Image (cartoon, rainbow, N blue to C red):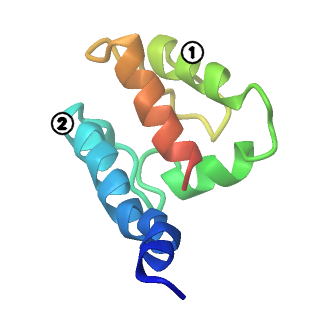
């Protein structure tokens, strides 16, 4: 296999950890990690569980952006998620895309 082809095939694998970390940094900066964790339930569900629940739902990204921006109640139990007033819609879209890519 030629080196250029090998690099082209491996590049997505090398970039994945960097992409995941970039949006986890945003989640940390916006205090999302106070209630959610990548792999385990805290106050709210883990990002892994959210991704699994909505993986086959076509409108999941738009629906979840709305829940992040407006808040949510009753989907994962009795604890309500308050609206994320510290996020722009673009930031919410970025975070939701990251969560759904897990």
> Can you say which quadrant of the picture contains the N terminus?
bottom right
Whether residue 67 is visible here, answered yes or no, is yes
**What residue sits 50% from the left and 17% below the top?**
71
Could you tell me residue 24's position as x and y percent? 30, 48
Q: Who's the residue at 49% across and 83% down the image?
A: 2
Nearer the observer, 77 or 88: 88
- Please, is residue 21 above or below residue 26 in the view? below
Q: Position of residue 38 (x, y in %)?
A: 42, 58
Q: Quadrant of the C terminus?
A: bottom right
Horizontally, residue 88 falls left or right of residue 80, namely left
Please name the residue shown 42% across and 66% down the image.
11
Q: Is there a contact, CB below 8 Å, between mark 2 and mark 1?
A: no
Element at label 1: helix
Residue 19 in the image: state x and y as whole percent. 35, 52
Q: Is residue 17 above or below residue 84?
A: below
Q: In the rendered image, which residue does mark 1 sit on? A: 66
Q: Residue furthest front?
A: 2
Q: Which mark is residue 29?
A: 2
Instruction: Point out the tag, 2 or 1, that comes first from the N-terminus.
Output: 2
Which of the two residues, 12 or 76, is positioned nearer the viewer here?
12
Viewed as shown, does residue 87 lie left or right of 65?
Answer: left
Alpha carbon distance from label 2 to label 1: 20 Å
């Amino acid at each position: 296999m030629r080196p250029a082809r090998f690099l082209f095939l491996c590049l997505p694998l090398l970039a994945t950890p960097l992409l995941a970390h970039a949006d986890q940094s945003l989640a940390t900066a916006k205090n999302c990690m106070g209630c959610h964790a990548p792999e385990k339930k805290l106050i709210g569900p883990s990002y892994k569980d959210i991704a699994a629940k909505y993986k086959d739902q076509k409108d999941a990204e738009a629906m979840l952006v709305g829940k992040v921006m407006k808040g949510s109640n009753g989907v994962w139990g009795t604890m309500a998620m308050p609206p994320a007033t510290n996020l722009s819609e673009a930031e919410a879209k970025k975070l939701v895309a990251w969560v759904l890519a897990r």
